[in-house]
Amino acid sequence: MRTRAAALASLLTLAALCLGDAVAGGYPFGPRTRAVNDLGNQFIPFHAQLRDLLYGRGDGGLFLNWHSGFGASLLPDLGTYVSSPFALLVAVFPRDEIDLAVYVITLLKTATAGAVMAVLLLRLQPGRWWAAGALGASYALCGWSVAEASYNPMWLDGLIALPLLCLAGEQVLAGRRFVTATLVVAVVWIANFYTAYMATLGAALILLTRALISRIPLGIRPLARLTAVCGLGVGLAAPLVCVVYFGTRHAYPGREAQFTPKPWTDVFARMLPGTYDFSSPALYVDTVALLLALTLPFNPAVPRRLRAGWTLLVAAMALSMRWAPTQLAWHAFAVPNGSQYRQGFVLCGLLVIAAWLSCAHGVPTPRALLPAGGLLALIAVSARSGAQIHWWTYPLLLAGVAAVAAAVALHGLAARLGRPLPAVLAVVVLIGAQVGQSAATMAVADRLRLRHFDDYAPWGERQERQRKVIADADGWPRYRTEPGREQTVNNDPLMVGGQGAGYYSSLTSDVLSRTLTALGGGTTSRGRAVQSLDNPVTDAIFSVGARVRSSADPHQDTYAARPTTVTVDREKAPPLVTVRPAAGTAPGYGASPFRNQELLLGARVYTLPRGIAVRGTDGRPAGRSPAHGYRLPASPRAARLTATCPGGSEVFLWAPHYWGNALMRGPRRPPSGFRGDWPVTKLAAMQPLGPAPRSGRVEVSLTARKNSVIPRDAIGCLDTARLRAAVDRLTARGATGVRVSGSSLSAELPPGSRGLAVIAAPRIAGWRCAAGDGPDRPAATYLGLVAVPLDGGATSVSCTFRPPGLRVGGAVGAAALLALTTVATLRALRARRRGEARHVHH
């Protein structure tokens, strides 16, 4: 019976998801992309990186990712985004079908959640298998799942974890399957520790309520078993959990958010079908399940103690999402960026369990259905002013209510006639309404999500061309191949290869973001998405010998070239390891990115105009900003910036808080686009404008699309001859050979090298280095890069990278494994003695 219920839940879930995506015209059923927001920018690229890792391809290993951010810690990213067992399925898909692989994984996770919930329902209370299967699908298709987790696939592991942990806890309370339950806890915490934490809290509340309602004595031994299972399971997951935890400690700080509960009208609105909103709790369960849940307090067939206990639990859970301290506790005491109701799946699960407990004790009678219908009507009326309500919401709701009414009538007809056909039709009507409502809600979420978020094209001809060109140009580790600024997604290096600056993760290191920003780099997502810098000075600093240039992405720019044109610019670059003189005092970055680049390069290569003039669209001098820059209001007319540079020098514009186009007067070339917000949500990267005319008079037209600020030192004039000389000096004093293997690097140096060996990689936590045969020590830092002190006697350096937290997590994991093995052995010996005693007795 449980197998049939699980199978039905899975089939209904898959049918509703695929139908909803097909109705919305979404990938892979239609032309609309699924890759919105972080799904396209982070999750699909990290699945691609996992696939490359499984096949032994790409640069780096399990610990270090040389593709992104000029060298980023990989294990925390894997533990955050792709540590689920389901993620391993990427190995069976071709590399160019990575979008399809992630979609299939999403479907399978959601269907599995429905199946496990169906099994849990039958474990909580015996009943009809088809009803358990249908309600299992209601849980899998809840609003949290279709509106939020469908494009955050790692969260779906939490959807599976809640019923799975409840099943494991039931076994432990009964004194059975201690080892199996511990392994279940370990797997769900490894799969996604963030939602597993919420699922663990939810499961604890469910088990506690069960024990109190059933008058099960919660003595010391059952509680000790549960605590031991949870502790040992989390301990087994510690090697990954600790690495992720320490990764967040070293990450660039995100936005400081304050929790403000949404009004009840929004909460009630999100319980109805066909609603969507990013910032309110997605509590939809189909009308059939919601109406059944509302019958629980009024259903006389359900024991009074059970009714009261579960009703209070659902109410307490709902209220906990309104109070800041409990809301903070649900999110591991950190207010999340973006959606602030990530524990919503727990409340959806409680509603589904309440629905099951009501119907499993018998079909609710009008005595229960009428007050439940009144509550549903009150919810619907109260929600009418919610911003999430659309014209299709109430028709979908009424269709669900009509289906319930029709099913009740058919059930009564079957009882009067004594024939099963009307009852079968009632089941078909209910399941049809459930699938239809959930598919419609999925379609609505798919469509509206595209309006709210940036979206990205799935893998196609553009990425295929880029990947091939990058592979042909690749010379790692002699030099880096930069995938370029014309990105498809923020994590382009993971998708198309190369060794670039581009990188986007919740764990983007603080040192990487601050270093690249100091050099004039651009960022989005409040500093956690860093972009490539199209600048020959930073290319020299980071040993970029090949830079890929592509036409704009046609998915983002309607006027972009089709097909995508991809070319490669090659420049002489110093080796990955260079030798710098030891500084008497530690240098630091200043306010000017031009001077910061020179500081890191070790040579003066820019001329900075003594002053620039900015005139507004009316020809008058632009207003000054508090930061001594120039204010530009949004306008279709162009403002004008003027400056003086040496004739023939390359002109660069640094305007991190400018959103618009910049075009320098002179030879025709496409305008440079800047996308920098004020104050710091997005920072625009420094960009080249072209060569200065012989006269040296630089005139730049600025067409601001948003209110912007231009800094007073916005122009830098690069002397390319000086840059070539600086590159030659660094090359002459640099490493004669560099070897990179996984998470280690070694380099041969010229004899007598003194000062600092500087590796063109950010000094993220975890690097240890040695000079020659010297001892292994934590790496030094040189303006944010990895450095190794040299005394003139060493002719080589070697460095290894281990992510912080791995040693501590490994020790905890080993201790947990030893404890679990000991317990398993003792239990096996005890069982064997009992068996021998019974044999002797007989």
Image (cartoon, rainbow, N blue to C red):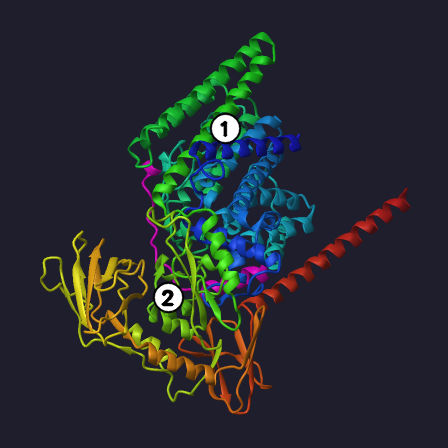
The type of residue carrying mark 1 is: Val
Q: Residue at x 42, y 87 (%)?
A: 581
Instruction: Reply above or below: 584 against 142.
Output: below
Query: From which residue to which does the magenta span run?
Result: 237-266
* Quadrant where the N terminus is found in the figure: top right
Q: Residues within 10 Å of mark 1 (few under 14, many from 20)?
A: many
The secondary structure type at the circle numbered 2 is loop
Residue 573 x/y as whole percent: 44, 75
Q: How many marks?
A: 2
Query: Does residue 252 belong to the magenta stretch?
Result: yes
Residue 238 x/y as whole percent: 58, 60
Residue highlighted by disc 2: 533
Q: Residue at x 38, y 83 (%)?
A: 586
Residue highlighted by disc 1: 435
The secondary structure type at the circle numbered 1 is helix
Q: Is residue 208 visible?
A: no
Q: Residue at x 90, y 46 (%)?
A: 840
